[in-house]
Amino acid sequence: MHADPLTNALAPGLYIVATPIGNLGDLSPRAADILTRANLIAVEDSRVTARLLHHIGVKRPMQPYHDHNAEAVRPGLIARMAHEAIALVSDAGTPLISDPGYKLVRDARAAGHPVVTIPGPCAAVAALTLAGLPTDRFLFMGFLPAKAGARAATIAEVAAVRATLIFYESGPRLGASLAELAEGLGDREAAVTREITKHFEEAVGGTLSTLAARYADAPPKGEIVIVVAPPGEAAPATAADADAALAEALTRLSTGQAASEVARALGLDRKALYARALALKG
């Protein structure tokens, strides 16, 4: 129970409230109720949240809480949670996804305050449902770094991950990012989704190189999510791969342990590898 039955006031604590990513009709009745009754709403941008509050016909006190002021503002919010209901929202979607809100949750828990989530829209998950790519395992990557070297390193880091990858991107950088993803990941199937839940919602599928060419000279408007398929099945390991892996493993492990490790890593028969390891040692 998160309300006083006599006064209808919300119980003190932190309320994490997901807000629409485009279509105001996606604000849940529970989210609207919490925002209506919260003592204070911690917001990314008060102008954006004011429009949402206007939509549900209420005015509430707001406190900007974002990357640039979070360290200074957080202690005061934590103190107020002892006796007030504080709601946390982002400009769109689920707070904490690609923003610094987790520190507020961490500190609220450490102070012993209740933390309640009011789930709802999330652009990353919505894009995944539109993309038509595997959904059994996925990795949310947020925005790629702005600097070229860091961007390439980040892409290389996830190239072998056997999961669908989800990136946020802006229109002006979309074509270049798609080209870099094609270069770093191989020319995989992908989808570019934009304007999710709005009138011009679209999901355009194709290979990364095809999509890069499509958007190279025509950057689209709106919030964009790139969804990239997992890597294809790896080619079967060759005898040379097995020998190289065994030679390295034998520098650290016994013959039996080396054979076991390489069998697991390459999906090969342990007995055959053990015999080969003995031959390599001999």
Image: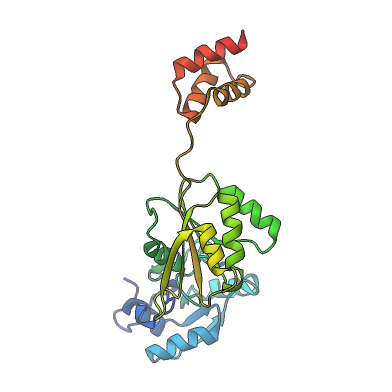
- With respect to residue 127, does 24 lie above or below? below
Q: Position of residue 267 (x, y in %)?
A: 45, 28
Q: Position of residue 272 (x, y in %)?
A: 47, 15
Q: Position of residue 255 (x, y in %)?
A: 55, 15
Q: How is the image coloured?
A: rainbow
Residue 103 seen in this snapshot: no
Q: Residue furthest top?
A: 282
Hey, which quadrant is residue 16 in on the image? bottom left
Callout count? 0
- With respect to residue 148, does 199 lie above or below? below
Residue 171 seen in this snapshot: yes
> Relative to the observer, which residue lies in front, 274 or 106?
274
Q: Position of residue 196 (x, y in %)?
A: 42, 73
> Relative to the observer, which residue lies in front, 15 or 114?
15
Tell me which residue sits at (61%, 73%) in the image.
172
- State which quarter of the image contains the N terminus: bottom left
Tell me which residue sits at (59%, 68%) in the image.
216
> Relative to the observer, which residue lies in front, 37 or 211?
211
Tell me which residue sits at (59%, 59%) in the image.
179
- State which quarter of the image contains the C terminus: top right
- With respect to residue 28, does 53 lie above or below? below
- With respect to residue 16, does 199 lie above or below? below
Hey, which quadrant is residue 73 in on the image? bottom right
